[in-house]
Image (cartoon, rainbow, N blue to C red):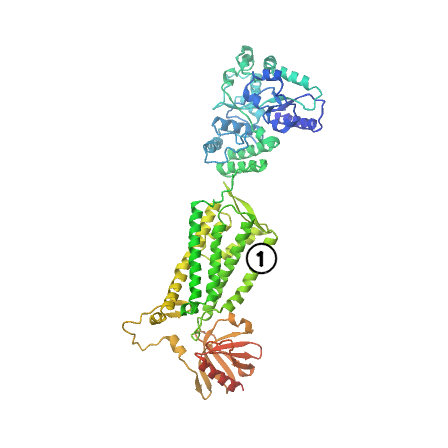
Amino acid sequence: MKNSDITDHTATAVQTIFRNKDSYIDLLALDVVWTGDYGEHLLPLDGDAGLASALTLHNPQNVAAGLVNGKLALNERKSNPAFYGLISQVKEPYEGLTCNVLEYLIAEQAGTLLEPNRTLSTFDQLSPIGQRAINVAKRWRRWQSLGYFPLGFAEQSSAREWARGNALFMRNWPFATAVTRNAQVTWPWRLTKLPGGAATLGGWLWGASKYTRQPEASRRVLELFAGAGWQKAKALSEGMPPTIPALYNDSEVCAAIPMCSVVSQLKVARRPSGAAGVHYAAVSKIIATYWFDILRGFGGTVESLLDRMNREIAALLAIDVLGEPTNIATTSPAVAAFNSIASIEILLLTAALACFIAWRKTPIVDTIGLGFLVPVTVGVVMVLVLVYLTAGTPSSATCVGQYWVQGFGFAMTVGACGIHLFRLWALSSNPFVTRRQTAPRQVLVLLAPACTMTLAILIAFSATNWIGAYETTLPKSRYIGIHHTGPGQAEAKLLTLSLANAAFLALVLVPFIELDLVDQPTGFVLRSLVLTAAVGVFLGAYMAPRVWLAYRYWRDPAAAASRNIVMATGTMTTTPTGGATNTSPMMDPVKMLQASHMKRFDFGCQGVLTMRFARRSWTMYLTPWKLAQTYLLPRERVLVVQPFGSTAHARCIPLAVISRIDMNTADKINGNEFNVILASGGWIQFMAADAVEAAKWVGEFKLAVG
């Protein structure tokens, strides 16, 4: 049987004995890496004076291998220091390969991968230990690619290959000495230490079962096994290397074991069985698997394979390799800077809104409308509050607060901007409109659905604990962020952000923040930069000029009016009145349309009107105005509407389908709107240049319809 098979069968037998707490067995031979597995079942030996005296003669490294939680439970039976060579135990993942890896790493002072304090020494690849481990791994891969480091050999097969004279160097356990002698090789050879002098601690240990009925006798037997006489006898009869350093000065021992000259120079490398505990076999398999791939050149770069190996070991042993959360501290300079900027912007926004309310009767504010200015300013202020809420390590309460503030802030800001822009677009082709602001009541009605839906979603999320603090892990760190516990969260989040990014192409940094692609301090800086920069542009480019113009109108209306301030679609330009006047006969096309009047002919009347059509009256406000040449033809019993700039055919409406014509009573300011209601329920709303012109058209319609 293979050595590994014998070890596996022995392990099964030992497990059965300890599981049944069988007292029949007093002493057991245990593999050196089983201390973590069976330590709780072994008789404590650290209080025995005889054993303590005997163990003072032994190599401290060998004695340390028998400690369980700092207490002596095992007595060294033999130690097989391993030796490196170009023929080695490098085959599909198994324990021998793990030993080879540890020897090379320890020789280069690159740690043992899993240290006794349960830290992963090569996780930080930029550290000196990490760099040395990477160099060892790259050297292995290079040697193997050049044919210097053949794969597929275990203990017995490598010893046979060596005995046949097919290798210059061989790394193996001391049993290979007997194999070499029995092969009666004809060429000279000798034992020596590996480069760096590292040798993995192998061999077996003696232990006493905690369930034995003879604890005192067991201790005395172990004391015998630990003595120099027994160690010398085993060395002479079986060639087992002793663990008492003084015996390597004994001429008889040195004659039987040709390693006395090098044993004192060895650095014993213990396998991480104590740190791995009952999971050592799995840890060893992980190490061997990834290093075998490193040798073969499979699975990616050396750095990526070592990183995956460390993370797999960490996951198996529940080792925290990322450290404390790296959330940006509330006392950091970046937080202080952005909080100051946000505070200044909030004060400026509040002051601007107060000025608009105080000067609401000025033409500037009247043109824009408080129905837009109030919700958009409040929404922007709420968005800026996120700068305060995203600093530091969040709790569940602050996570919920972030969602509420962000939800209502964006709903009000985006909703108000959308309503305002839609109204400006809807009125862009209507030269007869003198009041372009959106009425507060209309804004409230249009914002209500968005705010109601936002409120319902936030209440549902909060009530079901769908929002909370969670841990986001990055390659080298972690931070605490907002958690969405609902199903399909990643897909929904990605879809939402994709739509947002498509709508707001300037905010290209948002996906990096929301999809956890950067660490939390960087995310805080990017988010704060996006918010404060956008608000700063809004303040400087939109709010400030309008506050200044509103102030001028409030301070001196006559002087402001003398500047001939023109307001169109919510933007203002000023034209000086001094200097030479323009004597060009050309007239402003808009003013020409505004000055146009209805013309009567024998066959009817015609004129320029703006119109919009809706199948339901409540959808009328969602329809843009269109400037059209309008013909009312009583003889032909038809109404013809030809929109300007349209290549489509004119719309012909039989007068027979018109059920009613009346003035628009909702228009209490200008009085230049009238409605044509169709029998089918559709509405056509017309607007004339002024109230007098609208009254003329209503009269003509009523005469024509009859």
In percent of the image, x 47 and y 36: which residue is there? 125
Q: Position of residue 622 (x, y in %)?
A: 51, 70
Q: Position of residue 235 (x, y in %)?
A: 59, 15
Residue 14 visible here: yes
Looking at the image, how many numbered discs can be counted on the residues? 1
Residue 163 visible here: no
Q: Residues within 10 Å of mark 1 (few under 14, many from 20)?
A: some
Query: Which image quarter: residue 350?
Result: bottom left
In percent of the image, x 57 and y 34: which residue is there? 286
Q: Is residue 89 left or right of residue 208?
A: left
Residue that badge 1 annotates: 457
Query: Which image quarter: residue 116?
Result: top right
Q: Position of residue 87 (x, y in %)?
A: 52, 25
In percent of the image, x 33 and y 72: which residue is there? 562
Residue nearer the viewer, 637 or 351: 351
Please, which residue is most extreme toward the top here? 251
Residue nearer the viewer, 482 or 223: 482
Quarter of the figure with the C terminus = bottom right
Q: Position of residue 187 (x, y in %)?
A: 51, 17
Q: Secondary structure at mark 1?
A: helix
Residue nearer the viewer, 153 or 702: 702
Quarter of the figure with the N terminus = top right
- Mark 1: which amino acid? Ile
Residue 15, placed above or below residue 467: above
